[in-house]
Amino acid sequence: MPAIPRPGSLKDPEIAELFGKEDPEKIFEDLREIGHGSFGAVYYARDNVSKEIVAIKKMSYMGKQSIEKWQDILKEIRFLRQLNHPNTVEYKGCYLRDNTAWLVMEYCLGSASDIIEVHKRPLREEEISAICEGVLRGLNYLHSLGRIHRDIKAGNILLTENGTVKLADFGSASIKCPANSFVGTPYWMAPEVILAMDEGQYDGKVDVWSLGITCIELAERKPPYFNMNAMSALYHIAQNDTPTLSAPEWTDIFKHFVQSCLQKNPSDRPTAHKLLSHSLVTRARSPHVLIDLIQRTKTAVRELDNQNYRKMKILMIDSCESESTAGDNDDETPDEQAGGDSSKSNSITSEHSIHSIGVSASSQSSSTNSLPPVTDMNHDNSSYAQSLRPRQKASSSAALIEHGANNFATIKTTTIVTKQQKEHMQEEMHEQMSGYKRMRREHQGALIKLEEKCKVEMDNHKQLLDKEYEALLQKFSKELEELQIKHQQELDRKLKQNAAAEKKLHKEISTRQEADRKAFDCQKKKEYKANKERWKQELSMDESTPKRLKDAALQTQKENLKQMEAQEEQRLVQGQKEYLELEMRKFRRKKLLAFQLLEQELLKDELNKRQTQLEQAHSILLRHHEKTKELEYRQQKAVHQLREEQVQRQHSTELQNQHAYLQRCKRELRKKHAMEVKQQPKSLKQKEMQIRKQFRETCKIQTRQYKALKAELLSTRPKEEHKIVIKKLKEEQRRKLALLADQYEQSIAEMLQKQSIRLDESQELEGHHLQERLHYELEILMAYQSKNKMQTEAQRNRERKELEDRVTVRRDLLEQKMQQETEQVVQERSERIRLLRERQQREMEQFDDESARMGLSALAIADSTSECYPDDDSLSGSMLSLARP
Ligand code: ADP
Ligand code: MG
């Protein structure tokens, strides 16, 4: 993250590039305040070279939150300088001086809000249509660039001399869409901006909503809920039904337009582009509506100024006439119609005049107190006095020129006192609102940060688990591989052993048979010898047989014997061979059986291994599931806790603000009442003077009448009576005058009494009304808050339930997966067992067939076939039982 630049620093070339290097004080002359906003003042000015008239918005970044202010200033400049459209105010440049940015723009006559303030009545539908068209074109342009104005209201819709509508004040605008922060002016804010905190994001449709509210403002002079404190208004907007145009004078087309703009659900609200083809905009109207409106407004401003002048002049003459002294300069009429009693600053009337002329001590102090921290106070009075004339030309208050600056300024004084009181109140309200907005933005930021942190934590967690599981699976497959190799080796060893044992047995039997054969040979030889001896004896004893015959017989006998021996030996050898074969066969079969058993053992071993591995893997998966669940719950709890805290903090701030507002209203009322009391003697004095004047007039008339009467009487009466008549007349006159004097005193006393009674009563009533209104507002606010609290709580519960459901579903899925895996392993197991069994059976059959072909009785060889093949079910059964968790 790049370091946050120091306010006013031009080190960053991108920032330096935004500002002109010249001293703006040297470029612009005749500066006059024409508007006042959250940052400071907006001035009318003239470029001393090109003589072009411009507007300059001076924005200070000193004091509290200066970093934030500087960022906002940069944002507004960057935003404005990228715009180029007939319906957005034109950017002309920017300068820095005395910790203040001078944003130079094309000059406009004033805002739509100023116009309704001057006329003190709503605009005509045709005029509203024309303004809407301009606003929609401007909005359509902004929205097509993916931007949002976020502060559409009459005060930010300006008009030029030729009647063009210009969107101004991009201090709240968003360069990105969708956006999600709490920005704008409360009464004009769309519900989704107010709810942005919980619900997330909004888009250009918020401007369409604000345009709808602006239509109501232009049609009814104030936006809905304007008599309420902003805190309550926010809740009303978010939670109430949408406001409508009520008066019957408006056409259905206009009502429909407003209703479309004020759809609470943004997706039901048409876009600016779509609204450009609404009948309100497209239907025929005079092309001069706005020019005419401007002309009328200019005339009205002139008339108002003239009126005020005349009023003041009469009073001044009056006060001069009534023998008052120099102190009477501060006599002021509580003027309610000077065009300045609105709670918003009226940029068409001159505001700075108060600074140029001596004002009464009381109003002077109150005006300086109420001034915002950065204003035009650095200008000296003379420059102000000088600057008045061109300023009046600029605002078309030509009448003022005739009367001169001094008179004008004097007239303005009382107006500005009340106006600045209100402005002061606004200043405080503004501070409060910007603090509240900041808090809500901070809340949003903190929440986003926490959510991001949770996401990172969750990603890491999942990665860790995945890694662990992956490693486990790898370990398992390696183990299995090793086991298989070991098994193979065991089988090989067994085969070798078998071969060796077979060989050994073969040798054993062969050796034994050889010995047998030798013994047989020996035996035969012995037998042969014995036979030969026996035959010799038998022959020698037989004397009768000739020797030749004897020899022949002996020979034959020998041969017979040899033949018999040979036969016997052959039989022996044959017998031995068969025996050897049988034994070997038997041995091999036994070994084959044993080998097969071993194979079965090993397969069982391997399958069991796989089974335990699967079980281990599953227990890990379950543990992972539990761990993830734990983390999810923990994270959700943290987010919920933060949100709950934020809602609490928000509510308590709202209540605090509401209480401050309450105190402020009461204070203002007290101040107003004090002022009334203070003004009472003044106004009484005036009334007294009036009565005195009347009295004097009456005296004069009476005197005249008496004179006439005297003349008449004197002319008709004889001279000697004259003295008496004169005396009588004088007495009567004196009596009548005394009566008049009496009446005068009485009427003064009556008036005084009436006045004070009325004041007390009305003040009391006013206080009572205020109290009631504030009480009601506070109650409503609290009701909204508790509703809001319930809603947010319900939302948290809903989310909790959703998470629970999600976890359950995941657990079910996991179990399903584990079940599938288990089933798969079981199936694999029985399959492998089946294959082995079939192969082994085949091997055995082959073996037995071979034996049969060799003529060996299967029965003789196989003595324990039944135990060779364990029951399938017992094998797979035991495996199955293992497979089940
Ligand atoms: P803020 O952000 O304080 O509301 P704005 O930009 O709206 O500041 O300016 C405040 C007032 O100054 C406007 O309501 C308007 O009366 C006046 N103003 C602003 N810009 C111009 C301009 N270009 N020409 C004439 N008056 C302007
Ligand atoms: Mg503004």
Image (spheres, rainbow, N blue to C red):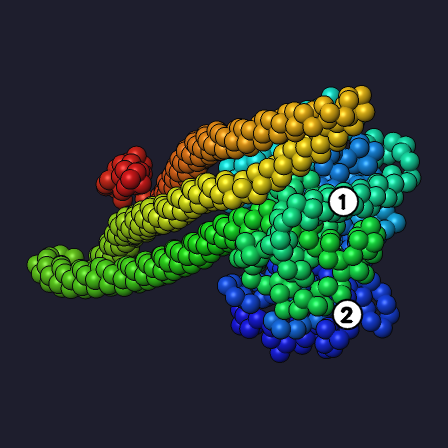
Where residue 79 sits in the image (x, y, percent)?
A: 70, 59
Q: Which residue is mark 1?
A: 310
Determine the secondary structure under disc 1.
helix
Relative placement, left or right, of 9 versus 666 is right
Relative placement, left or right, of 879 versus 639 is left
Q: Which residue is mark 2?
A: 28
How far apart are the two marked residues, 2 and 1, measured between alpha carbons?
34 Å
How many residues crowd around disc 2 within 10 Å: few (fewer than 14), some, or many (20 or more)? many
Q: Quadrant of residue 828?
A: top left
Going 11% across and 61% down the picture, which residue do you hit?
Answer: 530
Considering only vertical position in the picture, is 136 above or below 369? above
* Amino acid bearing label 1: Arg
Choose mark 2 or mark 1, whichever is in front: 1
Determine the secondary structure under disc 2.
strand
- Residue 496 in sight here: yes
Relative placement, left or right, of 11 versus 828 is right
